[in-house]
Amino acid sequence: SSESIAEPKTGFSFPATIGDSRRLLGVGLRKKSVLGLKNIDVYAFGIYADCDDVKKLVGEKYSSLAASELRENKAFVDQLMEADIKMTIRLQIVYGKLNIRSVRNAFQESVGNRLKKFGGGLDNHELLQSFTSLFKDEYKIPRSSIIDLTQEPGHVLSVAIEGNHVGSVKSKLLCRSILDLYIGEDPFDKNAREDFLHNAASLALH
Ligand code: DAO
Ligand code: DAO
Ligand code: DAO
């Protein structure tokens, strides 16, 4: 098997495994339209999940299904986003002119929407703002910087920039909201979601 996989449009490559047992299951591209005028390629991303955790999740429960049925199974897909599985979304910055203010704004929009969706309509605005203030103006994220968003055991979201830990938050709601951006029903990149589900289902049944 190959050592890394490239995101097709940008050519940015992702190692096939990270950590002890997190395996690459999908790659994609996060774009953003600016003032409805043009689309910016913001970052390429890789979706990693711990193989053993995924297998455990499936166990005997779905063993009668074919992989093609499993990946269409809504309960399975929901469980992948809700269970205590070690997962990492690795971002590689494509757009070289990102400033932290745009990151805060985008985060409040994309993650904020999901927090509302899964948080029972509660307004998380202040909470969200207090957390995005952790994104310090002095952080630099030039082109090809790597940001890892990792769900650690117990639904702890941990963020690292270029391998340096910058913060952790224990919140199942936050982890769920972030995973939804990549593998939920209205994802940033549909192909990445398809690949992820296909690979997770095959992995789970073998
Ligand atoms: O600079 O006007 C601009 C366009 C910026 C687009 C920013 C999108 C930011 C997306 C979040 C990045 C998370 C690392
Ligand atoms: O693409 O809209 C999006 C959501 C991306 C989540 C990014 C979190 C980035 C956190 C660390 C930034 C520190 C500068
Ligand atoms: O669990 O009630 C909740 C909502 C939590 C919102 C948290 C936003 C956290 C952003 C974390 C970035 C870490 C550097």
Image (tube, rainbow, N blue to C red):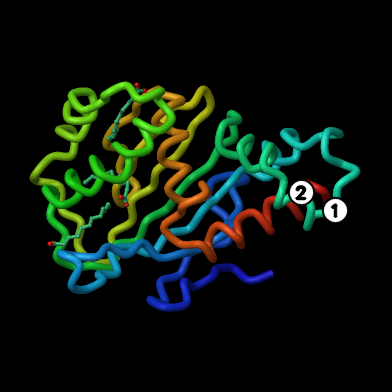
Q: How many marks?
A: 2
Which quadrant holds residue 199? bottom right
Which residue is at 54% across, 66% downward?
191
- Would you name the residue on which mark 1 appears? 66
Secondary structure found at label 2: helix
Is 165 situated above or below 40?
above
| Label 1 environment density (alpha carbons within 10 Å; few <14, some 14–19, many ≥20) | few
Instruction: Judge by depth and name the residue closer to the eye, 42 or 52.
Output: 42
Could you tell whether 52 is left or right of 135 in the image?
Answer: right
Residue 78, how many percent across, how many down? Answer: 61, 37
Could you tell whether 59 is left or right of 57 in the image?
Answer: right
Secondary structure found at label 1: loop
Instruction: Judge by depth and name the residue closer to the eye, 105 or 139.
Output: 105
Q: What residue type is disc 2 on?
A: Leu
Split into 4 quadrants, where in the image is the N terminus?
bottom right
Residue 84, how many percent across, how many down? Answer: 58, 29
Which label number is shown at residue 188?
A: none
Which label number is shown at residue 70?
A: 2
| Residue contact between numbered discs 2 and 1, judged by CB atoms under 8 Å | yes
Q: What residue type is disc 1 on?
A: Ala
Residue 25, how many percent across, how many down? Answer: 60, 57
